[in-house]
Every structure is written in structure tokens, then in C-alpha cells.
Image: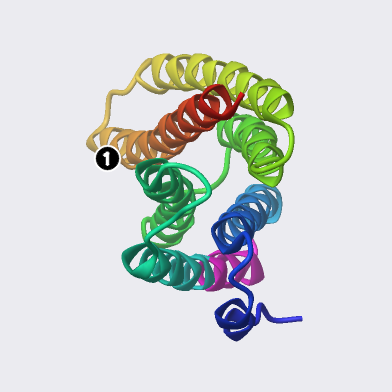
Amino acid sequence: MPFNLFKFYKRPTNIFFELLNEQSKKTLQGMKALETFMEAADEKSVIEVGWLEKEADETRRLLIEKLNISFVTPIDREDIFTLSRAVDDILDYCYSTVDEMVMLNVKPNAYLRSIVAVLGEATDQIHLAVLQLGKQPRAILEHASKAKKLENRVEDLYRKALSELFKGANEIGEVLDILKMREIYRHLSNAADRIDEAANVLSDIAVKIT
């Protein structure tokens, strides 16, 4: 069932939490679609990531609109904005990854599959933390901490992937392939950075409301 943005104009209670929940859910779905692409490299997953990215952008647009007209917010408006931006960036990097892999004809490899799988786990923890906004500060901290640990795993995989990538390149064609793959790895590393940022914001929110 498509997400009905219109309903939020009629439900002012906890609207910011609802919009953040919806945005993080779309981001998790996008990451899972990217994970599917890494396994099957199918066109359906490419379309799904693009569609989810547009849906999430619309949710963020509505959230910012509400921020601009609201005098009172359930948590600091700066935290709402920064968290929404970080979650949005995670999905943007998902889309950049799959879009450039198709455009540059880059095939999934074991490192890409491993990195995206861990990113999926981390994004799930961010979503679970967001679901606890306005409810359980302790649970927010627990999920944020797990997300940060998973982000560290992604960075370890990223460094190993780069180290392996630059071994034994001799021909010009091999160098070009390396540069393409490095760009894809960087998108995923950037997604991990945004997960870390989202986890930090969530932790700050939890501490403030404890």
C-alpha cells in the first residue's frame, strides 16, 4: 500500500516522530533493496531503490515544512532536522551506489555483498531507535550503540576491500576498473558515516530526554 502523506496534515500529535519513522522505514527498505541487488543484480531492485528514494525525499520535504510552521516540537528542532538529513543521506548513497553500478557496469563482488549486508543491519538498528522516539530513551541508546558498532565493521570491510582492490593492477583497463570500484566502495563508506551521524544524534536525543 502506498504511503499516504495527506493523513499527516490531519494528525498533529507526534507528527515529527511519525514522519521520522516513515523516513527511516523507507531508508531501511531501500537498503534491503540494495542488498537484493547485490545478490541478483536485477533491474527490479534498481527501480525499487529509486522509487523509495523519491518517496523518502517527499517525506523529508513534509517534515521540513512542518518544522518551519511549528512553534513547539517534541524534541529540539535542530535534532529533528539533523537526524532527518542523516537518514536521507543514507538512502541517497544507496541510490548513488546502485545507479553508478548500472551506469559503469560494475558487477557485485563478495566485498560489496558483505558491506551492504552489514549496512542493512546498521540501518535496521537506526530504524528501531527512531521507533523508540518519545517512548524509551534507554532503548534508543542501545540501538544507536549497536548501529555504531556495525558502522565500525563496515569501515573495516571498506579498508580491506580497498587494500585488495589495489593489488596487482598492471593494465590500463584494470586501473579503470579499480577506479570504478573504488567510487562504489566510497559511496557505501559514506552511507556508513551517515549511519554513525544518525546514531550520534539519536544518542544525544536520548540523553536530553532522560
x, y percentage for residue 180? 33, 42
Q: What element carries label 1?
A: helix
Specify the farthest residue to the bottom: 6
Which quadrant holds the N terminus?
bottom right
Residue at far front of view: 71
Q: Give the range drawn in magenta.
A: 42-52
Residue 38 x, y percent position in the rendering: 63, 48
Q: Main secondary structure of the magenta part?
A: helix
Q: In the depicted view, which residue is nearer to us: 188 or 20?
A: 20
Q: Is 149 on the left-hand or right-hand side of 135? A: left
Instruction: Name the residue type under label 1.
Output: Leu
Q: How crowded is mark 1: few (under 14 residues within 10 Å), some or many (20 or more)?
A: few
Instruction: State the count of labels.
Output: 1
Question: Which residue appears at 60% of the width and 35% of the height?
Answer: 119
Q: Which residue is drawn at 49% across and 43% down?
A: 75
Residue assigned mark 1: 176
Q: Is residue 18 left or right of residue 89?
A: right
When asked about the image quadrant of residue 136, the answer is: top right
Provide residue 29's location: percent of width, then percent of height. Answer: 67, 57
Q: Nearer the viewer, residue 189 or 130?
A: 130
Q: Residue 13 appears in which quarter of the rendering?
A: bottom right
Residue 86 lies, with reference to residue 200, above or below; the image says below
Quadrant of the frame with the C terminus: top right
Residue 202 on the magenta span: no
The question of residue 45 being in magenta is answered with yes
Answer above or below: position of 82 versus 1.
Answer: above
x then y, percent, for residue 150: 62, 22
> At x 69% / y 34%, what residue is drawn?
121
- Between 85 and 35, the residue placed more toward the observer is 85
In the picture shown, does residue 91 fall above or below 82?
below
Image position of 157 (left or right of 92):
right
